Image: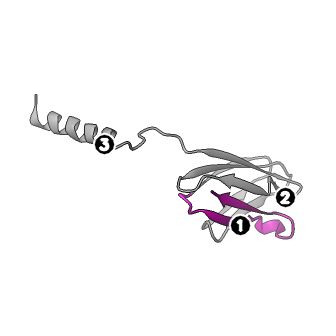
Amino acid sequence: MNPRTGATYLILGLFLASGAPVFADDPQFALSIKEHRFVPSELQVPAGVKVKLLIKNEDSTPEEFESHELHREKVVPPGQEITVFVGPLDAGTYPFFGDFHQDTAQGKLIAK
């Protein structure tokens, strides 16, 4: 066996033996924007892992998913869906809002 090939297999074997997920998918959670409100307005996600938020805007106007605590700000065009990755999060509550309709478009992620 070529020494380089052996070293490659050794490194790969150690990585796999470490228990690290090689092809694990991030947990997904769906949010909708309807009538300038996030649905659901409270979304429970697991703490300690990266999560994928699928945010669909069902309104005829754009909205923004924004959170100072999550350090995210992304426009959701009307009738379209965006993906936002957050985390891993510590256990706690993380508010978010729609910047274009701050009076009604509010919600929070609750990491447990």
Mark 2 in CB contact with mark 1 (< 8 angstroms): no
Distance from the alpha carbon under mark 2 to that under mark 1: 14 Å
Span of residues in magenta: 87-112
User: 68 or 88: nearer the eye?
Assistant: 88
Would you say 60 lies left or right of 14 here?
right
Disc 2 target residue: 37
Badge 2, how many Cα within 10 Å: few under 14, some, many 20+? many
How many numbered discs sit on the rendered protein?
3
Find numbered disc 1 in the image and state the secondary structure of the residue it sits on.
strand
Whole-Å distance between the Cαs marked 2 and 3? Answer: 44 Å
Query: Of marks 2 and 3, which one's residue comes earlier in the chain?
Result: 3
Residue 13, percent from left and from top: 26, 37
Q: Is residue 81 magenta?
A: no
Question: Hey, what amino acid is under mark 3?
Answer: Phe
Residue topped by disc 1: 95
What type is the residue that disc 1 sits on? Pro
Element at badge 3?
A: helix
Q: Which mark, residue 15?
A: 3
Q: Is residue 22 left or right of residue 111?
A: left
The residue carrying pointer 1 sits among few (fewer than 14), some (14 to 19) or many (20 or more) residues within 10 Å by Cα, namely some
Q: Position of residue 102 (x, y in %)?
A: 82, 70
- The image quadrant where one finds the N terminus is top left
- Which element carries disc 2, helix, strand or loop? strand
Residue at screen point 76% across, 68% down? 99
Task: Single out the mark in the foreground, 2 or 1.
Answer: 1
For the residue pair 22 and 78, the one nearer the viewer reads as 22
Q: Nearest the camera: 4 or 77?
A: 4
Name the front one of labels 2 and 3.
Answer: 3
Earlier residue among tags 2 and 1: 2
Residue located farthest toward the top when viewing the structure as drawn: 1
